[in-house]
Image (cartoon, rainbow, N blue to C red):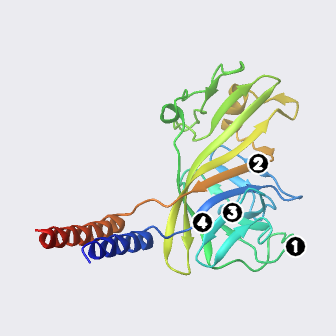
Amino acid sequence: MQYRSHFSALAIAAALTTTAFAGPVGTLSIGIVPSGGVNVSATRIDFFPSVNPVGSVTPTYGDFATGSPTSITYSLGTVTSITNPYGRLSDIDTTFGVATPFIQFYTLPGLPNGAGPLLPSLTFDLISILPGGAAQGVAGNCTGFVNPGQSCSPLLSNGTVSPFVLTDRAGGITDVSLGMLLRANDVNNGTSTLFSGGFTTQVTTQNGLRLTPDAIQTFINGGGVITNTYSATFTGSAIPEPAAFVLLGSGLLLMAVGMRKRKTLVQ
């Protein structure tokens, strides 16, 4: 009897904190569809099929293939590359850095080509794009960056630093990356979880031009658009919210009461 109240309080605390940590968790990996790819300009990322391409006023969306590492668990089950092999993602305007919804999954197994029913119970919002330059430990101007190992973010013609990070690699390759923070929404129970990650691609040449970081900066500031493939990986895990700490405090209080009663009985 002396221990029962202590363990009951512990069980209640565990139950309370478990509910506060609910939300989609796992890994999301995406890549291009057979007709897919991406156009990248100074402030815009357009995914294929290009429903509303670079140069149009309003970004829309393109399709992606769900990668095999994908496994996202939420209240209605688990999303994988087998259950939902394709999805749709919104084009990105890096000036605003938000898109709601950003990523959704198609429910049919066939290649959708920009249309088809979408899974309503699990969505991803783009809530922020990581800033480039000094915020990521790289230079905020790519002028003169033509040697392997050098990293920078392009300085745009409007005086701002691009969120893209460019890294010159040996063999004539330049890595292009863009860090993001997403919010995964379990629409069924109203919970959400933060997922962090980003898009990456490698570029070499375009129209005979070797795409060093220096050349990319000049090219996009002149209105040029880089066309390439892409991949992306995002990972999310349960993060304590303020409500979790309130519930945890309630559970600890119950434990304290139980231990105090036990002490009284022993005395």
Nearer-the-camera pick, 21 or 63: 21
Q: Quadrant of residue 112?
A: bottom right
Q: Earlier in the sequence, mark 2 or mark 3?
A: 3
Which residue in the structure is indicated by mark 1?
110
Q: Confirm whether residue 55 shows in the render.
A: no
Q: Is residue 257 left or right of residue 186?
A: left
Image marks 4 and 2: residues in contact by CB distance under 8 Å: no
SS at mark 2 in the image: loop
Which residue in the structure is indicated by mark 4?
124
SS at mark 3 in the image: strand
Q: Earlier in the sequence, mark 1 or mark 3?
A: 3
Q: Quadrant of residue 143?
A: top right
Type of residue at label 3?
Ser
Q: Earlier in the sequence, mark 1 or mark 4?
A: 1
Which residue in the structure is indicated by mark 2?
230
Which mark identifies residue 46?
none
Mark 4 neighbour class, 10 Å CA radius: few under 14, some 14 to 19, many 20 or more:
many
